[in-house]
């Protein structure tokens, strides 16, 4: 755990928190047999296996499929929310009692796109929050490579921010981010199904670009308990 905490402090992210194969398989199987819904439209429900048919019928791309409490309340995910290892990492890094804040499970679907759309998506970096003492654990439930919308993190961006970055909430360009942090600090998180990593929520990350492979991701958010020192 010491290596994980040290990496979080220095880089804002740490990987190699791999899920057991059986847990990975159980969550993926549940996702493949449970309807998800479009973002901001819980009434538009569909099975992930039906996405191609739905896109042909509607003539519109399906970029994401979100799962609600039907899956998030399953014993496997609930057990991860109270996993001793995850809680110990959060408590040590946040220097406080951690509380589970939110869980999300979603598909990032492969969609066809123009070169212009790919270039536009590749330029957009953002932060989840400006507030300290918040961590997010990510777990891939499918193999993820550079064609699978990998999570992209800007190393050291949790602690090295221009004054404007502290007060403005907006998307930033690749040019702006690479100029301030260095292109070498922009890293894509790729790996086999089960790969897990934890990130300081203040880090800049890049919004997913169009891809050729679908990605299924579980996200667990923790924050310092209010009033904790």
Image (tube, rainbow, N blue to C red):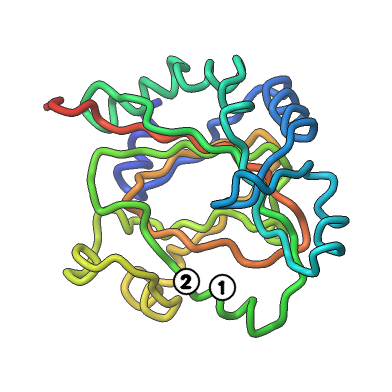
Query: CA–CA distance between discs 2 and 1?
Result: 6 Å
Q: Position of residue 101 (x, y in %)?
A: 37, 31
**In what element is the residue under mark 2?**
loop
Q: Residues within 10 Å of mark 1 (few under 14, many from 20)?
A: some
**In what element is the residue under mark 1?**
helix
Write down the quadrant of residue 193 in the picture.
top right
The residue at the point 25 percent across, 30 percent down is 224
* Left or right: residue 169 compared with residue 59: left
Write down the quadrant of residue 33 in the picture.
top right
Q: Which residue is mark 2?
A: 124
The residue at the point 55 percent across, 54 percent down is 151
> In the current view of this chain or complex, which residue is farthest to the front?
43
Residue 121 numbered mark, or none: 1
Q: Position of residue 26 (x, y in %)?
A: 73, 23
Whether residues under marks 2 and 1 lie with C-beta atoms below 8 angstroms apart, the answer is yes
Does 52 appear above or below 8? below
* Left or right: residue 26 compared with residue 2: right
Does 7 appear above or below 23? below
């Amino acid at each position: 755990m010491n290596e994980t905490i040290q990496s979080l402090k220095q880089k804002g992210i740490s990987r190699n928190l791999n899920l057991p194969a059986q847990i990975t398989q159980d969550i993926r199987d549940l996702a493949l047999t449970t309807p998800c819904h479009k973002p901001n439209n819980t009434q538009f429900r569909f099975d992930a296996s039906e996405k191609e048919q739905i896109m042909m019928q509607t003539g519109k791309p399906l970029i994401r499929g979100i799962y609600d409490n039907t899956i998030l309340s399953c014993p496997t995910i609930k057990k991860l929310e109270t996993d001793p290892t995850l809680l110990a990492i959060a408590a040590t890094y946040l220097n406080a009692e951690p509380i589970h804040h939110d869980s999300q499970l979603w598909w990032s679907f492969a969609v066809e796109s123009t070169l212009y759309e790919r270039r536009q998506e590749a330029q957009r970096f953002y932060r989840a929050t400006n507030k300290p003492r918040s961590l997010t654990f990510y777990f891939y439930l499918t193999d993820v490579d550079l064609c699978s919308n990998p999570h992209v993190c800007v190393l050291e961006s949790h602690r090295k921010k221009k004054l404007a970055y502290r007060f403005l909430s907006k998307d930033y360009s690749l040019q702006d981010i690479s100029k301030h942090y260095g292109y070498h600090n922009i890293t894509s998180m790729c790996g086999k199904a089960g790969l897990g990593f934890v990130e300081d929520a203040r880090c800049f990350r890049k919004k997913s670009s169009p891809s050729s492979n679908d990605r299924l991701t579980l996200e667990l958010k923790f924050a310092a308990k209010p009033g904790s020192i």
